[in-house]
């Protein structure tokens, strides 16, 4: 049986129920099919089962779907063709079939809805706006249509209209996670350059989490709301931010494949946004989240993550009262340098630290206590510097090493290329040889004759 045959079966056949099945029977059949086709192992089959369940449990959508079954075979065939093209990602072709159905049956709003979704997926945002606007005018109390219209406005960069429609969608359904995420996206677009943006986003995120707290199905969808709440939490409330991060880890762990996918996206967003939030202290907790993600298990990835964490902590050293010379040193140490110029600079910084030990050694001891991971990046030198009884000997060794490395660099990379000897392009002509001009005379009596005034 081909995939096209599976699509042609229809939603009742997908769930294995009769067309007269009631709500309880549909629900029972759905959970029975989900146990058989788990989303982690059968993502495509689960998608079909879920779609069938959502259509048949919505009275209006089910009535419209049943109406399609009563259409002439040629029209019903168009609908199944459209579903097939949707399934394989050819959304533009699916939109053509939906449009053909609507020309003869404009009353089928479920087809109109699919038509609008196909247009949006095919980046036909202008036409999609028109179709969603028509659906909203027909069904002003439908929160899904309001949200889709708001998203279409946002796709067109009409942020003011999008924000208005997002608020309308929330008024119609405050428990919809998707409605709140749209409001956050519209707020970011509308208030991008305003100084109070973070505070506003934090307020919206907390309202959203409170409004959707009763939602128990697909809880992993709450992860983006926790991400926004986390990165907009001030540094003075780091404990609250840590609670959001732990909740993200829980939802990732319990959300199956979809939860891991959403958790991975959250991890990448937090990694980028955390430095601006000033919440670098959350990196140990963020590493715990990384351990839940399949693509973060290998040591190379985790080591890279630790390097990123250290780089952000290093950038914050100046704000902690440390001299800039330490930032310069650690930047060189965590960069993957390959040339001797960087090594020269490291030696020069080491010399400077030892030579000005009254200024730098107290900060070294503080660095060892407060930032042991950063201290360990150059721990062997720091320990030697703090313990030595002969700093002058350390200075001498570094000065000698610096001079030797500098000489090696100057030999390997000379500043000026030596002049190459000029070589004659033609063979040399002796004075007694025939003149090359062909006169028959000796060269010394012809063109080789000295010029006299």
Image (spheres, grey):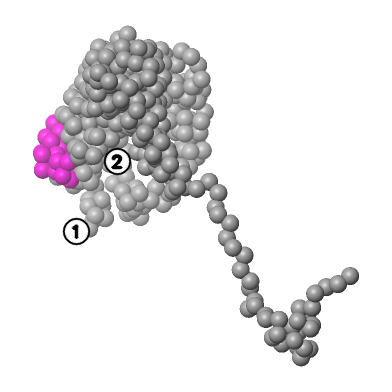
Q: Is residue 432 placed above or below 159 in the rendered structure?
A: below
Give percent across and percent down for residue 264: 26, 33
The reply to whether the magenta stretch includes residue 109 is no
Which residue sits at x=39%, y=39%?
Answer: 405
Going 27% across and 14% down the picture, which residue do you hit? 365
Magenta residues, start to end: 24-42
Classify mark 1: helix, strand or loop.
loop
Mark 1 or mark 2, which has the lower sequence index? 1
Name the residue at 62% across, 65% down: 422
**What residue did someone put label 1 on?**
1
Q: Could you say which quadrant of the image residue 205 lies in?
A: top left
The residue lying toward the viewer, choosing from 29 and 256, is 256
- Identify the mark at residue 87; answer none if there is no mark: none
Residue 372 in the image: above or below residue 89: above
Identify the residue shown where x is 34% and y is 25%.
395
Question: Are circles 1 and 2 on residues that touch, CB within 8 Å?
Answer: no
Few, some or many residues within 10 Å of mark 2 (<14, 14–19, 20+): some
Q: Secondary structure at mark 2?
A: helix
Q: What is the crowding at mark 1: few (fewer than 14 residues within 10 Å), some, or many (at least 20)?
A: few
* Foreground tag (1 vs 2): 1
Measuring from the top left, give residue 367's x and y in whole percent: 28, 16
Q: Nearer the viewer, residue 111 or 173?
A: 173
Residue at the farthest bottom position: 440
Residue at the limit of the structure toward the top, as seen here: 236
Which residue position is annotated with label 2? 65
Q: Is residue 328 left or right of residue 161?
A: left
């Amino acid at each position: 049986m081909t995939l096209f045959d599976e699509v042609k079966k229809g939603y009742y056949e997908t769930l294995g129920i009769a067309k007269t099945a009631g709500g309880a029977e549909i629900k029972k059949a759905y959970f029975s099919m989900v146990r058989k086709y788990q989303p982690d192992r059968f993502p495509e089959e689960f998608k079909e089962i879920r779609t069938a369940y959502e259509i048949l449990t919505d009275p209006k959508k089910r009535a419209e779907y049943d109406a399609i079954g009563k259409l002439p075979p040629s029209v019903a065939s168009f609908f199944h063709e459209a579903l097939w093209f949707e399934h394989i990602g050819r959304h533009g072709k699916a939109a053509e079939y939906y449009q053909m159905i609507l020309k003869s049956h404009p009353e089928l709003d479920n087809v109109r809805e699919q038509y609008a979704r196909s247009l949006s997926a095919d980046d036909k945002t202008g036409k999609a706006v028109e179709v969603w606007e028509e659906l909203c005018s027909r069904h002003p109390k439908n929160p899904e249509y309001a949200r889709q219209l708001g998203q279409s406005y946002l796709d067109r960069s009409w942020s003011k209209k999008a924000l208005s429609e997002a608020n309308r969608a929330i008024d119609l359904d405050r428990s919809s996670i998707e409605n709140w995420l749209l409001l956050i996206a519209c707020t970011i677009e509308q208030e991008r350059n305003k100084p109070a943006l973070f505070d506003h986003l934090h307020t919206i995120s907390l309202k959203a989490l409170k409004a959707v707290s009763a939602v128990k199905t697909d809880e992993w969808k709450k992860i983006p709301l926790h991400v926004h709440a986390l990165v907009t939490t001030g540094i003075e409330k780091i404990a609250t931010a840590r609670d959001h991060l732990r909740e993200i880890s829980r939802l990732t762990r319990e959300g199956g494949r979809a939860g891991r996918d959403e958790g991975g996206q959250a991890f990448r967003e937090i990694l980028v946004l955390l430095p601006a939030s000033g919440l670098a202290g959350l990196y140990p907790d963020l590493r715990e989240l990384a351990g839940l993600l399949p693509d973060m298990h290998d040591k190379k990835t985790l080591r890279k993550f630790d390097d990123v964490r250290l780089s952000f902590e290093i950038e914050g050293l100046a704000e902690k009262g440390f001299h800039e010379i330490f930032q310069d040193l650690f930047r060189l140490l965590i960069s993957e340098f390959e040339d001797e110029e960087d090594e020269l600079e490291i030696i020069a910084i080491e010399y400077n630290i030892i030579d000005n030990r009254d200024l730098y050694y107290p900060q070294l001891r503080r660095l060892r206590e407060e930032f042991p991971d950063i201290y360990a990046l150059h721990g062997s030198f720091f320990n030697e510097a703090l313990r030595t009884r002969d700093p002058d000997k350390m200075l001498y060794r570094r000065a000698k090493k610096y001079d030797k490395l500098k000489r090696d660099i100057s030999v390997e990379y000379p500043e000026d290329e030596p002049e190459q000897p000029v070589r004659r392009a033609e063979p040399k002509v002796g004075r007694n040889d025939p003149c090359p001009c062909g006169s028959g005379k000796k060269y010394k009596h012809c063109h080789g004759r000295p010029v006299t005034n």
